[in-house]
């Protein structure tokens, strides 16, 4: 008869934490996913571009377990797939709502529209992608996040607090996301919730916002990642943070008011 004792619960291997990152096929989302994979996180990544997402999945799968369903956060069934994928890996400890749209339609080299001319279907899509999708995905993942005292990072923009011509739709949607983040933090004390303005970045979305301009002087998205990793590591008070402050000051108090004016608004969510 085998009399060997069963291993104690503390002897069982720990399941690596799971992060869900939207808009993770390029830009800030992909750079953050790379850093999390190197730190041992399992990943659920998503984006709308199937080919780009598949390339990201292939790269990250060499480092960690990855699930990568393609789709839009606006789609109910797609959000369900993301939540199910996170549960299958052990349950989400982190949600990064990074997916965004500038206008809800392809600009094709055109300038950002003034509010007086903003096509209403595009404005509706902007709010659905930038606000309603993140809120709905957060709702689905909250049971997993609560169980693990997890965290939510909502990627914002300085356009949420500054009035820039042409940025009414995007800025208003990010302002709404900021406020939703603050309310969620008040309602969910066991879940850390931060809205983060990443600052200027050299991304495809930023180039689309400034067609024909040279944006090579903007920092690459990888330079912002340490600020996000610091939030996850240090778990400061809930609030709205500027990545520039996190990088220069460590973990400052959350910004209670409008940040300093920037030279140009910063689109995020790639």
Image: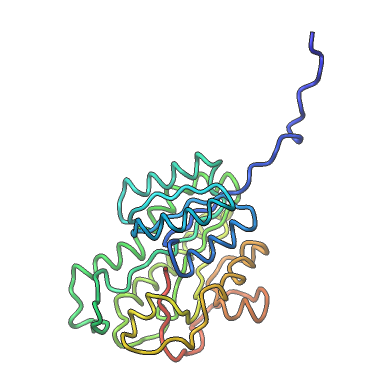
In this rendering, is residue 119 above or below 213? above
In this rendering, is residue 152 above or below 160? above
Image quarter where the N terminus lies is top right
Locate residue 24, reporting x and y percent: 45, 61
Q: Where, by quadrant of the figure, is residue 73 drawn?
A: bottom left
User: Could you say which is closer to the camera, residue 117 or residue 172?
Assistant: 117
In this rendering, is residue 55 above or below 251? above
Q: Residue at x 39, y 44 (%)?
A: 81
Q: Residue at x 44, y 69 (%)?
A: 178
- The answer to whether 269 appears left or right of 147 in the picture is left
- The answer to whether 45 appears left or right of 75 in the picture is right
Image quarter where the C terminus lies is bottom left
Q: Residue furthest top?
A: 1
Q: Residue at x 34, y 60 (%)?
A: 49
User: Could you say which is closer to the camera, residue 59 or residue 97?
Assistant: 59
User: Could you say which is closer to the camera, residue 85 or residue 133?
Assistant: 85
Locate residue 112, reporting x and y percent: 27, 82
């Amino acid at each position: 008869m085998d009399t060997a004792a069963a291993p104690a619960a503390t002897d069982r291997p720990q399941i690596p934490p799971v992060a869900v990152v939207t808009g993770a096929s390029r830009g800030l989302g992909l750079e953050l996913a790379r850093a999390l994979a190197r730190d041992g996180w399992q990943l659920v990544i998503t984006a709308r571009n199937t080919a780009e997402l598949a390339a990201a999945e292939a790269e990250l799968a060499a480092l960690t377990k990855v699930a990568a369903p393609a789709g839009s956060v606006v789609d109910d069934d797609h959000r369900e797939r993301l939540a199910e994928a996170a549960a299958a890996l052990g349950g989400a400890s982190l949600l990064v709502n990074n997916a965004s749209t500038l206008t809800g339609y392809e600009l094709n080299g055109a300038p950002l529209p003034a509010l007086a001319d903003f096509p209403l279907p595009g404005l509706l899509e902007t709010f659905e992608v930038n606000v309603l999708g993140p809120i709905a995905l957060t709702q689905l993942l909250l049971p997993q996040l609560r169980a693990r005292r997890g965290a939510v990072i909502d990627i914002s923009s300085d356009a949420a607090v500054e009035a820039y011509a042409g940025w009414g739709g995007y800025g208003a949607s990010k302002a709404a996301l900021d406020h939703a983040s603050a309310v969620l933090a008040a309602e969910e004390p066991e879940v850390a919730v931060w809205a983060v303005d990443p600052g200027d970045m050299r991304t495809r979305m930023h180039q689309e916002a400034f067609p024909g301009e040279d944006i090579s002087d903007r920092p690459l998205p990888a330079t912002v990642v340490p600020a996000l990793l610091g939030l996850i590591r240090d778990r400061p008070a809930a609030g709205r943070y500027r990545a520039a402050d996190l990088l220069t000051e460590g973990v400052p108090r959350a910004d209670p008011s409008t940040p300093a004016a920037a030279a140009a608004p910063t689109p995020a969510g790639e």
